[in-house]
């Protein structure tokens, strides 16, 4: 975090978290965020009610899919406690900083990538990040405002799970964003996703739609359809809550392997059901948010 700490005391965002920074500093931070995001046409916040539903892998593959279609795309990970995007995208090392102290995104096959993990020195990455709410709010706002994205057609933001301080800070800092909510079909995930839907409605965050991950898949050995969880829960929940249902993404073990290798499935020549289903989601995003 040292690179961003340099801004403290100079009117930068390091001095103006939600925990007691001056009004002038807070106003300056708002201007920084507005300036950073002003050249981005569409912002998509990928969020979930709970962890473990594949939110980060979905965010990464959506961003890769949009980039492959020729759109100028950025991918941002603002998960303080469990940043995954750097590992999924194979990004290593600290972010480079411009002379005026702005972070330069990493470039991965034409896709601009920024992760919270890129702010940590290698020896600090396995340490627990222990911050109270106001500190987390300040860091997230600073992180969003201090990145030099340039002109983008899409910015995909991998938000922390749940409905606490972190996703609230993201939603309030990027007010014109739309939310893609990721769930899995089982009841415990659907219960939490309903909270996420209500969270979006309370903070006036427009919902692009609900996406069901880890759905039924065809067994490569016997050809039978296997349901790891219940089937159709995401679609029923979307209908009950009055939001668009984007579709079901089947479970695919190759996704796990690809993410561990640092190369998302959509960035490989793998034409399985996962890629096909996710490509349909990307096409829907392109259709509804034509740039």
Image (tube, rainbow, N blue to C red):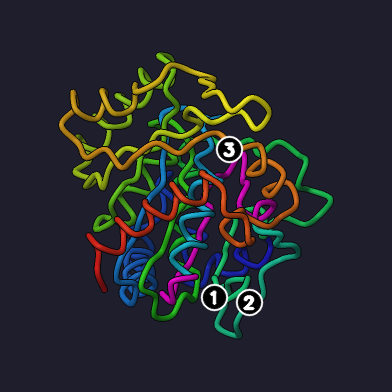
Secondary structure at badge 2 equals: strand
Pointer 2 or 1: first along the chain: 2
Looking at the image, which is closer to me, 4 or 26?
4
Residue for point 48% across, 52% down = 140
Query: Which residue occupies the extreme right position in the image?
Result: 123
Pointer 1 residue: 102
Looking at the image, which is closer to me, 257 or 270?
270
Determine the CA span between mark 3 and mark 2. Answer: 24 Å
Secondary structure at badge 1 equals: loop
* Label number found at residue 131: 3
Q: Quadrant of the N terminus?
A: bottom right
Pointer 3 or 2: first along the chain: 2
Asked whether disc 2 touches disc 1, contact meaning CB atoms under 8 Å apart, the reply is: yes
Q: Based on the displayed image, in which of its 4 quarters is residue 54 positioned?
A: top right
Pointer 2 residue: 97
Q: Based on the displayed image, in which of its 4 quarters is residue 32 positioned?
A: bottom left
Residue 82 belongs to magenta span: yes
């Amino acid at each position: 975090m040292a690179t961003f700490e340099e801004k403290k005391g100079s009117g930068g965002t390091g001095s103006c978290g939600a925990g007691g920074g001056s009004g002038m500093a807070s106003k300056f931070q708002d201007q920084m965020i507005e300036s950073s995001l002003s050249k981005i046409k569409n912002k998509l916040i990928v969020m979930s009610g709970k962890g473990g539903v594949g939110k980060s892998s979905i965010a990464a593959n959506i961003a890769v899919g949009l980039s492959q279609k020729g759109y100028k795309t950025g991918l941002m990970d603002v998960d303080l406690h469990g940043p995954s995007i750097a590992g999924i995208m194979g990004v290593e090392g600290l972010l480079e900083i411009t002379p005026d102290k702005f972070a330069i995104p990493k470039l991965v096959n034409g896709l601009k990538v920024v992760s919270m993990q890129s702010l940590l020195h290698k020896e600090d990455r396995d340490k627990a990040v222990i911050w109270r709410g106001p500190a987390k709010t300040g860091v997230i706002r600073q992180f969003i405002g201090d990145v030099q994205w340039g002109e983008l057609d899409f910015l995909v933001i991998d938000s922390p799970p749940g409905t606490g301080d972190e996703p609230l800070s993201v939603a309030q800092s990027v007010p014109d964003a739309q939310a893609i909510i990721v769930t899995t079909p089982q009841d415990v995930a659907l219960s939490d996703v309903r909270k996420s839907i209500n969270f979006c409605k309370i903070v006036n965050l427009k919902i692009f739609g609900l996406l069901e991950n880890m759905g039924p898949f065809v067994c490569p050995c016997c050809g039978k359809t296997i349901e790891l969880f219940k089937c159709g829960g995401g679609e029923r929940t979307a209908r009950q809550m009055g939001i668009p249902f984007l579709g079901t993404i089947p479970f695919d073990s190759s996704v796990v392997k690809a993410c561990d290798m640092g190369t998302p499935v959509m960035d490989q020549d793998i034409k399985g059901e996962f890629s096909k289903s996710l490509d349909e989601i990307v096409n829907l995003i392109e259709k509804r948010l034509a740039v």
